[in-house]
Amino acid sequence: MPLTRNLNIIIMKNSLLIAICLLSVPAFGALDTNRIEQLTGLKGTWTAAEGVFKITAPRTDIPVAVDGWKMPPFMGLTTWAGFVEGKKAEALLAGDLVLFEDEVNPVMSALFEHGVSVTALHNHFFFDDPKVYFMHIGGEGTVEKLASGVKAALATQRQIRGDKPQPARVFGKPFAPGQNSITGVRIEEILGTKGQANNGMFKVVIGRSAKMPCGCEMTKEMGVNTWAAFAGTDDNAIVDGDFAVLENELQPVLKRLRAEDINIVAIHHHMTHEEPRILFLHYWGKGNSEWLARSLKKTLDAQKAVK
């Protein structure tokens, strides 16, 4: 076979291989910043040095006092969402939403419905009036999906304030059961865990472990645990507690709790340098004690299903 023909065949094969490789790699262009602004309804700014497009929304609808001082939004009361071109998807999202207590859980559910993750929930101040919480968000995907999630969160927040101008002080109706009289045996049966009774209240604790740099084990009694405490009556109960989760368990657990209409009140860490990394999410729910226990069992099952 002539040398030139061999070379042509080799070149054709290499060209075909390169073409296949190029087709298999997602082709992402520059961020569609106009579309982000259209979807969120907010003007943004472009930071060329970092390739970040950022939208902001100062909370100016309700005055917030911190330590007795009326705080301007510039001092830390501004919702923001930043977009950067992704590596495995079209875009990467990060942000922080400034929310009042009665906005937190409806906004969280709206984010989940649009495929946006919630990565932290906590306070930034003491002595703030009304109380302000900060919800950190993230996600990867199309600009359309991520910006739509931010839009839904902001729309939910605005609807709540439109319906009720002043932030609520309780979850629905005040909880006032009188004497506590929780039937613990039914909770034990549902959760499959022995618990502890105390003056009509009931608590179950499920341990897990992590290792510290010293080689020491952090275990159930050292605070690495999921727990649930019930108070009130079987027909009118509250449950509060904490889920200890690995990072890849956080979103499934949050989504399941919200699907069960249980409120999330904090997401944070309790330790540093532990292995594996453990995050803690605190929750609060109201309802029939058996229904609450079944909701927690569904959440525990969702956590166990994570690979």
Image (spheres, helix red, strand yellow):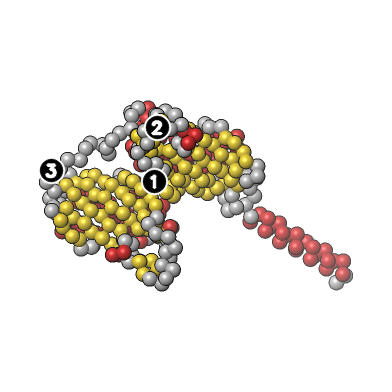
Residue tagged 3: 178
Closest to the camera, between mark 1 and mark 3, is 1
- The residues tagged by marks 2 and 1 sit, at their Cα atoms, a distance apart of 21 Å
Q: Is residue 131 above or below residue 61?
A: below
Residue tagged 2: 69
Q: Is residue 83 left or right of residue 238?
A: right
The residue lying toward the viewer, choosing from 296 and 67, is 67
Q: Position of residue 284 (x, y in %)?
A: 28, 47
- Displayed quadrant of residue 43: top right
Whether tag 2 and tag 1 are in contact, CB under 8 A, the answer is no
Name the residue at 49% across, 43% down. Answer: 95
N-terminal label among 2 and 1: 2
The amino acid sitting under disc 1 is His
Is residue 302 shown to the viewer in this render? Answer: no
Residue 122: mark: 1
* SS at circle 2: strand
